[in-house]
Image (tube, rainbow, N blue to C red):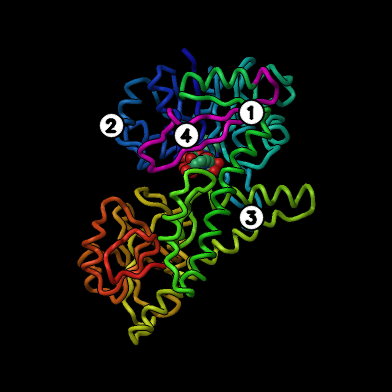
Amino acid sequence: MKKLVVMGQGYVGLPMALRAAAVGMDVVGLDSDAALVERLNAGRSHITDVSVDELRQGLDFGYSASADPTCIADADVVLVCVPTPLHRDGGPDLTAILDAAGVIGRHVRKGTLVVLESTTYPGTTEEVFAPLVLGDQWAQGEVMIAFSPERIDPGNQVYGVRNTPKVVGGLTSRCTEAAVEFYGILVDTVVAAKGAKEAEMAKLLENTFRHVNIALVNEMVRFSNELGIDLWDAIDCAATKPFGYMAFRPGPGVGGHCIPVDPAYLSHRVKAELGYAFRMVELAEEINRAAPLYTATRALELLNDRRMAANGARILLLGVTYKPDVADCRETPAMPLARKLIDWGAVVSYHDPYVPGWRVSPGRSLNRAADPYEAAEQADLTILLQPHGSYDLARLAASSRLLLDTRGVVTASGVVRL
Ligand SMILES: NC(=O)c1ccc[n+]([C@@H]2O[C@H](COP(=O)([O-])OP(=O)(O)OC[C@H]3O[C@@H](n4cnc5c(N)ncnc54)[C@H](O)[C@@H]3O)[C@@H](O)[C@H]2O)c1
């Protein structure tokens, strides 16, 4: 049975490592965070989608976490699932990929398959990752290198590692074949791309598609509101068309590690290589980045209708993670919204079953309501940002003095949508 090392034990790497352990592979989850390694080996999961039971079962199957990269020398396959954030200037930050590739290069042996899974711009695997992995020691093909985009959707109860098709593209056809064979053990469907660049582009196309379509409805909601049209109803009607349409719904902005970040990897690459702009992405970024401010403006309007100022108003934010039923607050649009409301003098509190404490700026944490329904009774305005499954929406509508539903999910009368 294959020996596998999965570098990076976060939202992506840990579920993949546990899936491999479940099918009988000998798996080491390699992470540079020694404290995380200790927690994982003690059976404590840091990810909502991985229950303590699943982690403990993985440990029973033979999974272990480690911070020691010498395990790479024993591996048949190494997967790289490290973060790919943006620099402060908005460009790609490949630091973790470069570090991981350098570490692999120092330990890898002949015949190993090395697959980069981290989202990145087309060309990274061939131009940046492979030279560091191969170093002066190995020729192309002696160590096989491929790219396979990670498609995990945290919180999704239907699609997980096993039943989400996996795209793979190698630097050579032999690399692709090796990657197809490996992933065929783990997932139901493997799709071979023409090469690594096409596999890299497929991931960015998927996320850019979401980004642009979310921006489309986030722009439409503004003028629909002014024209007195219920855009959510129009979307539901459009969604009855059985072909040629896919429903996206407006919201308070985009968040997470993917949608606000990945398209920038592509637009940056286009600009750097070709000198011109990827205009669709730039426009989508502009619109989606403005969505929290639009939400704040809607709050202002609602208070104004009731002869109230934002200054001094008690505003409750419900669900501050970037999507429902996950604990992930990275890039959450709730953050710029909360900051804007605070700037305007509102007394902002929040409730989120997944977020025990929430700091919106250095030294400034918001008050966390113990009970969302009691807090809604007290607040001048409640803003529903994420409809977590545990929220009773009818009760929320009944408890709120004034409810702004940014997701279009509350059907009770008197509730205002974005
Ligand atoms: N989270 C998602 O929903 C999602 C979905 C699809 C794709 N992705 C992509 O997958 C990649 C990983 O994302 P994530 O959400 O799992 O990140 P994460 O921050 O949850 O986890 C990354 C882990 O990698 C570790 N790490 C960093 N540098 C390392 C190194 N050099 N060696 C070993 N470990 C290292 C960190 O300590 C951390 O535990 C990113 O490129 C991301 O864009 C994420």
Which residue is identified by label 1? 193
Residue 83 seen: no
Mark 1 residue's CB less than 8 Å from ligand 1: no
Assess whether mark 4 and mark 3 are in contact (beta carbons under 8 angstroms). no
Residue 288 percent across, percent down from the top left: 54, 61
Q: Which residue is mark 3?
A: 281
Based on the picture, tell me whether residue 6 belongs to the magenta stretch: no
Residue type beneath disc 3? Val
On the image, the x and y values in percent for residue 195 come to: 68, 28
Question: Circle 2 sits in a helix, a strand or a loop, which is it?
Answer: helix
Mark 1 vs mark 2: which is more N-terminal? 2
Q: Label 4: few (<14), some or many (≥20) within 10 Å?
A: many
Segment colored magenta? 146-175
Label 2 – label 3 distance at C-alpha: 41 Å
Name the mark nearer the viewer: 3 or 4: 3
| Predominant SS of the magenta segment | loop
Q: Nearer the viewer, residue 133 or 200?
A: 200
Residue type at mark 1 is Ala
Residue 329, given in percent of the width and then of the height, sits at 42, 54
Residue tagged by mark 4?
13
Secondary structure under tag 4 reads helix
- Which one is earlier in the sequence, the residue at label 2 or at label 4? 4
Q: Which residue is mark 2?
A: 53
Could you tell me the amino acid type at mark 4?
Gly
Q: Residues within 10 Å of mark 1 (few under 14, many from 20)?
A: many
Q: Secondary structure at mark 1?
A: loop
Q: Are marks 2 and 3 in contact (CB under 8 Å)?
A: no
Q: Nearer the viewer, mark 2 or mark 3?
A: 3
Q: Is residue 46 left or right of residue 231?
A: left
Using the numbered discs, state the Cα–Cα distance from disc 1 to disc 2 in whole angstroms. Answer: 35 Å
Q: Are marks 1 and 2 in contact (CB under 8 Å)?
A: no
Q: Is residue 397 left or right of residue 407?
A: left
